[in-house]
Image (cartoon, helix red, strand yellow):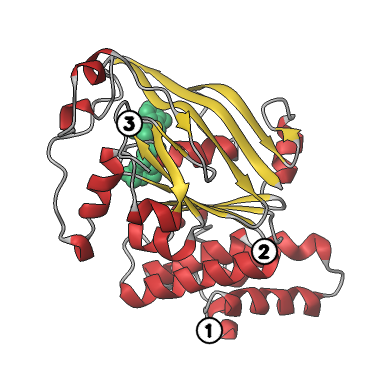
C-alpha cells in the first residue's frame, strides 16, 4: 500500500543571482514498510526533497506539486495539523544532528520531553527513555541519559537524534545522511539500528545518502537524483547489476569497491540549467537530441523508470 506519494515536486529559490531550481518534477512513491534510497552527488537536491515531504523548507522556497501521506494531501494541511503529524507520523533524522539537539538539555530529557504526555508515571517515562537509548546502542543508558549532547561523539549524537526520531514509532522516517562522517563501526551500528527499527515497526524509510554501499544494504529501491531531478528509479538488485542511466552507471563505478573511477566534469549549476539533458556535458553517449531536448521520465516495468534519450537496455 502506498504511504507516501510525491508528484511533480518543484522547489525554487529566488536569489539575487537568479532562480535556483533545487527540485524539478520529482515524482516517486513509497509503500508501507518499504525502504527507498535517494542517492546522488552533493548539492543534487536530496535533502530538499526530504524537507519538502515533512514541510520544513525555509519560507523563501517556492514549492509546487502534490505530496500525499496516508491519503492526506500535505499541501493543504494546516500548519497545526502538520505540526502534530511531525514526530508522531513522519519524522526526520536531520543531516546535522547537533543543530537538532538542545545543547543545554540532558540527553535523556530530550526524549522524555516528547514522551511525557503519553505516560502518567515518572517511572514509565524513565523506562521508555532507557529502552530508546539502548535500542540505538547508547549504553549504558543510565549514564548517557544523564550526560549532555556535547559529551557524546559525532556518531553517538547521530544515534541520539535517531532515537528521538523514532520515539513515537512514526510510520515514515526520513533519514538524511545518517552515516555522514562516521567511522566504520559507527556506520555499521547506525545501519543496523535503522534496519531493525524499520523492520520492527514496519515503518517506511526514505534514506537520503551519498553512500551507495549503505543504500545497497538497506534499500528495496533506489532513486538517483541529479541536478534536482530523479534520473532513474529501480529495485536495488537491478540498479547495481543493470543501471539504465549513464549517470547511475558512472556513480556505481565511482564506488571504492568498483574501482573509484571518477565521473569527469561537474554537474550543471541549478541557476543555469541546460535546455537538453542535465547530464549531457558529462555523458560519453551524448547525441544531438540530448543537447536539444530535455528527456522525460519514462516509467518501465518493475516499479521504476529512467530519464534518458538513450538508456542502456533492460
Ligand atoms: N535555503 C536555500 N536557499 C537557496 N538555495 C538553497 C537553499 N537550500 C538549499 N539550496 C540549494 O539547493 C540545492 C540542493 O541542496 P540539497 O541540500 O538538497 O543538496 P543535497 O543533495 O542534499 O546535498 P548534500 O549531499 O551536500 O547534502 C543546492 O544547490 C543548494 O545550494
Ligand atoms: Ni543533503
Q: Is residue 295 above or below residue 237?
A: above
Q: What element carries label 3?
A: loop
- In the image as oriented, which residue stretches furthest toward the front? 313
- Residue 71 image label: none
Disc 2 to disc 1, C-alpha distance: 17 Å
Disc 3 to disc 1, C-alpha distance: 41 Å
The one nearer the camera, 216 or 99, is: 216
Disc with the residue nearer the chain's start (3 vs 2): 2
The one nearer the camera, 210 or 157, is: 210
**Residue 227 percent coordinates (x, y):** 32, 31
State which mark lies toward you, 3 or 1: 3
Q: Report which residue position mark 3 lands on.
A: 227
Left or right for 53, reference 82: left
Q: Which residue is drawn at 59% across and 33% down?
A: 6
Quarter of the image where one finds residue 167: bottom right
State which mark lies toward you, 3 or 2: 3
Cβ at disc 2 under 8 Å from ligand 2: no
**Residue 247 percent coordinates (x, y):** 27, 40
Q: Report which residue position mark 1 lands on.
A: 139
Disc with the residue nearer the chain's start (3 vs 1): 1
Q: Residue at x 38, y 51 (%)?
A: 239
Q: Report which residue position mark 2 lands on.
A: 167
For the C terminus, give its image quadrant: top left
Can the viewer see residue 59? yes
Disc with the residue nearer the chain's start (2 vs 1): 1
Crowd class of label 3 (few under 14; some 14 to 19; many from 20; radius 10 Å): many
Q: Residue at x 60, y 84 (%)?
A: 142
Left or right for 7, reference 46: right
For ligand 1, give the image quadrant.
top left
Q: What element carries label 2?
A: loop
Q: Is residue 289 above or below residue 136?
A: above
Amino acid at each position: 500500500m502506498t504511504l507516501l506519494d510525491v508528484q511533480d515536486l518543484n522547489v525554487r529559490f529566488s536569489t539575487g543571482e537568479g532562480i535556483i531550481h533545487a527540485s524539478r518534477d520529482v515524482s516517486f512513491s513509497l509503500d508501507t514498510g518499504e525502504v527507498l534510497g535517494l542517492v546522488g552527488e552533493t548539492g543534487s537536491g536530496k535533502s530538499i526533497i526530504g524537507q519538502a515531504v515533512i514541510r520544513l523548507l525555509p519560507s523563501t522556497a517556492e514549492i509546487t506539486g502534490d505530496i500525499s501521506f496516508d491519503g492526506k494531501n500535505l499541501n493543504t494541511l494546516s500548519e497545526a495539523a502538520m505540526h502534530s503529524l511531525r514526530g508522531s507520523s513522519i519524522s526526520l533524522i536531520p543531516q546535522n544532528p547537533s543543530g537538532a539537539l538542545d545543547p543545554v538539555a540532558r540527553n535523556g530529557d530530550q526524549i522524555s520531553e516528547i514522551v511525557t504526555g503519553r505516560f502518567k508515571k515518572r517511572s514509565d517515562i524513565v523506562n521508555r527513555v532507557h529502552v530508546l537509548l539502548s535500542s540505538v546502542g547508547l549504553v549504558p543508558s543510565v549514564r548517557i541519559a544523564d550526560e549532555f549532547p556535547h559529551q557524546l561523539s559525532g556518531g553517538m549524537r547521530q544515534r541520539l537524534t535517531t532515537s528521538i526520531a523514532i520515539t513515537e514509532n512514526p510510520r515514515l522516517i526520513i533519514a538524511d545522511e545518517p552515516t555522514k562522517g562516521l567511522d566504520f563501526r559507527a556506520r555499521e551500528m547506525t545501519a543496523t539500528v535503522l534496519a531493525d527499527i524499520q523492520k520492527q515497526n514496519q515503518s517506511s524509510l526514505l534514506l537520503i545518502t551519498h553512500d551507495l554501499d549503505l543504500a545497497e544494504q538497506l534499500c528495496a529501491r533506489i532513486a538517483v537524483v541529479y541536478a534536482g531531478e530523479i534520473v532513474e528509479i529501480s529495485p536495488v538488485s537491478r540498479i547495481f547489476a543493470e543501471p539504465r542511466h549513464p549517470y547511475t552507471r558512472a556513480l556505481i563505478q565511482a564506488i571504492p569497491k568498483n574501482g573509484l573511477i571518477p565521473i569527469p566534469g561537474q554537474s550543471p549549476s541549478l541557476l543555469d540549467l541546460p535546455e537538453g539533458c542535465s547530464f549531457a556535458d558529462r555523458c560519453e553517449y551524448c547525441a544531438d537530441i540530448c543537447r536539444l531536448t530535455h528527456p522525460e521520465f519514462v516509467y518501465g516495468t518493475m516499479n521504476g523508470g529512467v530519464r534518458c534519450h538513450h538508456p542502456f537496455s533492460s
